[in-house]
Image (cartoon, rainbow, N blue to C red):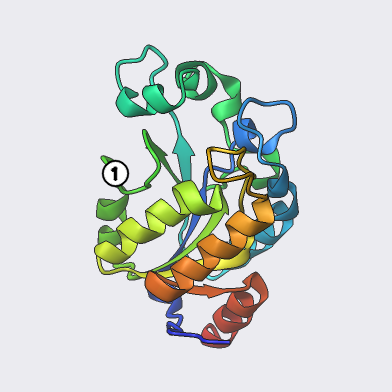
Amino acid sequence: MMKKVKWAINPGRTALIVVDMQKVFCLEGEGLYVPDTANIIGKISALSALMREQGMPVIYLRHVVRGDGSDTGRMQDLYPNVNALLGRDNPAIEIIDELAPQAGDIVVDKLFYSGFHNTDLDAILRMKDIDTLIVCGTVTNVCCETTIRDGVHREYKMIALSDANAAMPYPDMGFGEVSAAEVQRISLTAMAYEFAEVTSTSDIVTRIEAASR
């Protein structure tokens, strides 16, 4: 197996980015439900707890819009119901209870896919002298991957967790249906080759523990 890069973990300069683990994406019956999120909650929770113990920042991204259509632009063209699903008045925009932000955690709201687009995420990270970002959450190839691409463009060392990012299946858009597993495999492969280190949560836990001794 090819591995193009492996970043050294410096606990003083590494942060966790938890992408869109909101009720609207993670709870069955909600409008943007991603079933595979159920498989990553435990891993994200354990890693978040470890990083808090080590004084490493835990930063949550939330996809939230005003709800009146004034800030959705092309997103509304792509998702006509975005204002109802992600509007500030919808209780489902909150982070799921299992991963509820703790004292000292940071929550950054975003209007589109990238955590960096028109947000203060970059300023927060630079104020904290962070140069390495561990990314987990959903959807793997959309908000997670877009944030990773934007992060590496800003010279951050990006790490994607292979078992703590959740993909979704796609219907036939003219090229055949695509399963969540296929999307996950292709997205992780592209990120590993082009943009980031891709590794498991257990590997990152081991490296953080070793670096913190």
Circle 1 packing at 10 Å, graded few (<14), some (14-19), many (20+), is some
Please provide percent x and percent y for residue 146.
Answer: 39, 52
> Residue 20, relative to residue 33: is it above or below?
below
Q: Quadrant of residue 155?
A: bottom left
Q: Is residue 82 left or right of residue 23?
A: left
Q: Amino acid at mark 1?
A: His
- What residue appears at the point 29 percent right and 42 percent down from the top-left corner? 119
Q: Quadrant of the N terminus?
A: bottom right
Q: Secondary structure at mark 1?
A: loop
Whether residue 139 sits left or right of residue 87 in the image: it is right
From the viewer's perspective, tell me whether residue 131 is left or right of residue 57: left
Compared to residue 35, the image places residue 74 above or below, namely above
Coordinates of residue 31 in the picture (x, y in percent): 63, 25
Q: Position of residue 56 (x, y in %)?
A: 48, 66
- Residue 191 coordinates in the image, percent (x, y): 45, 67
Which residue is painted at 35% across and 59% down in the image?
149
Tally of marks = 1
Quadrant housing residue 181:
bottom right
Residue reaching furthest to the top: 68
Relative to 123, residue 112 above or below: above
Residue depicted at 73% across the width and 56% down the height:
42
Return the residue at label 1.
117
Residue 104 in sight from this viewpoint: no
Q: Nearest the camera: 75 or 208?
A: 75
Q: Is residue 49 visible?
A: yes
Position of 23 compared to 7: left or right?
right
Identify the residue shown where x is 38% and y is 69%. Answer: 195
